[in-house]
């Protein structure tokens, strides 16, 4: 049976969707979920966050300044949760099950954001100077658990402890994902992939730029390239190369100053 959300958690997620629409972003990300948790004033997450000095307007202003695009347009083609947000929802369900709850509440969503530790919402909290360890411990106490569990839960996941390079922190290796079978097959994009390889193989002017409306398959072309590299179906010019995607919004949200 699929786990369900409490009424307050559902309302927080609905608010997250409204914030994404208001900011003219065609997806619901972890930053919008954080704003939704603050907007749902009856939830445990709201109480814990406000007790730790986090305000809704602060978060919205930071999303607007660091992430939202000026003059952006809401894109119906890409409605839904971002991949990172989906992982947060899954982790929240696991936390609810871990503590013997049949429904996932706002507290589990907040814990999932902090446990995952690489999402935009987490970086926004860090940029605001919030002690995320204390927030996590306070959430544990609020649901009747031992606050010291945060040491075990976050000990190996906090920033600055055994983290790799900045590239590893802010990027995703599509060639590794292709090798592990985590990418969907790419069908009907042979011509575009071949053209992409041709441009990459040039000695000069070798920076391809894929443009088009959301949903037309730009990402699929890049994933197809990664799959061909793994399968060895590429010329020597791109053989054994890595294809990485860069989380630009995460980089900007994790920085203190712009420019």
Image: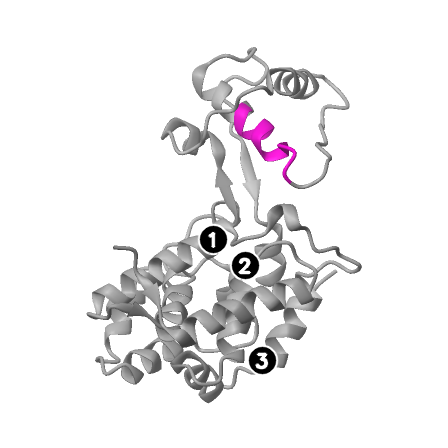
Q: Which mark is residue 29?
A: 2
Q: Position of residue 94 (x, y in %)?
A: 28, 60
Q: Which residue is depicted at the point 75% across and 56% down?
A: 72
> Answer yes or no: do the residues labelled 1 and 2 have beta carbons within 8 Å?
yes
Residue identifier under label 3: 56
- Would you call the spot at circle 3 few (<14 residues within 10 Å), some (14-19), or many (20 or more)? some
Q: Which quadrant holds residue 100?
A: bottom left
Quick one: label 3 or label 2, which is nearer the N terminus? 2
- Image vertical order of residue 213 relative to residue 18, above or below: above
Circle 2 sits in a helix, a strand or a loop, which is it?
loop
Left or right: 122 as drawn, with respect to 60: left
Quick one: label 1 or label 3, which is nearer the N terminus? 3
Q: Which quadrant holds residue 107?
A: bottom left
- Would you call the spot at circle 1 few (<14 residues within 10 Å), some (14-19), or many (20 or more)? some
> Answer yes or no: do the residues labelled 3 and 2 have beta carbons within 8 Å?
no
Residue 126 appearing in the image? no
Q: Which residue is depicted at the point 70% across and 67% down?
A: 65
The quadrant of the rendering that contains the C terminus is bottom right
> Answer yes or no: do the residues labelled 1 and 3 have beta carbons within 8 Å?
no
| Boundaries of the magenta span | 215-224
Quick one: label 1 or label 2, which is nearer the N terminus? 2
How far apart marks 1 and 2 lie (CA) works out to 7 Å
- Image vertical order of residue 236 relative to residue 57, above or below: above
Residue that extends furthest to the bottom in the rendered view of this protein: 51
Circle 3 sits in a helix, a strand or a loop, which is it?
helix
Q: Position of residue 170 (x, y in %)?
A: 52, 49
> Is residue 43 one of those drawn in magenta?
no
Please name the colour scheme applied to the rendered image: one colour
Residue identifier under label 1: 84
- Image vertical order of residue 112 relative to residue 144, above or below: above
- Image vertical order of residue 139 relative to residue 102, above or below: below
């Amino acid at each position: 049976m699929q786990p369900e959300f409490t009424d307050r958690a559902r309302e927080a997620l609905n608010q997250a969707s409204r914030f994404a629409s208001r900011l003219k972003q065609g997806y619901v990300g972890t930053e919008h979920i954080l704003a939704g948790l603050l907007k749902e004033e009856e939830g445990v997450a709201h109480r814990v966050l406000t007790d730790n000095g986090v305000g809704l307007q602060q978060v919205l202003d930071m999303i607007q300044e660091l992430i939202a695009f000026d003059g952006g347009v809401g894109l119906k083609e890409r409605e839904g949760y971002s991949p990172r947000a989906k992982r947060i929802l899954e982790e929240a369900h696991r936390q609810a099950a871990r503590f013997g709850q049949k429904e996932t509440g706002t507290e589990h969503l907040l814990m999932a954001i902090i446990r995952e530790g690489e999402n935009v919402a987490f970086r926004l909290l860090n940029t605001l100077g919030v002690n995320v360890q204390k927030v996590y411990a306070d959430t544990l106490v609020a649901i009747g658990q031992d606050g010291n569990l945060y040491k075990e839960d976050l000990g190996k996941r906090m920033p600055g402890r055994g983290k790799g390079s900045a590239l590893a922190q802010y990027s995703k290796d599509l060639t590794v994902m292709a090798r592990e079978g985590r990418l969907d097959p790419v069908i009907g994009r042979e011509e575009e992939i071949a053209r992409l390889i041709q441009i990459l193989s040039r000695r000069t002017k070798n920076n391809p730029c894929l443009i088009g409306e959301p949903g037309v398959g730009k990402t699929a072309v890049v994933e197809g390239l990664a799959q061909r590299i793994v399968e060895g179906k590429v010329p020597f010019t791109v053989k054994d190369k890595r294809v990485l995607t860069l989380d630009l919004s995460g980089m900007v949200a994790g920085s203190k100053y712009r420019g």
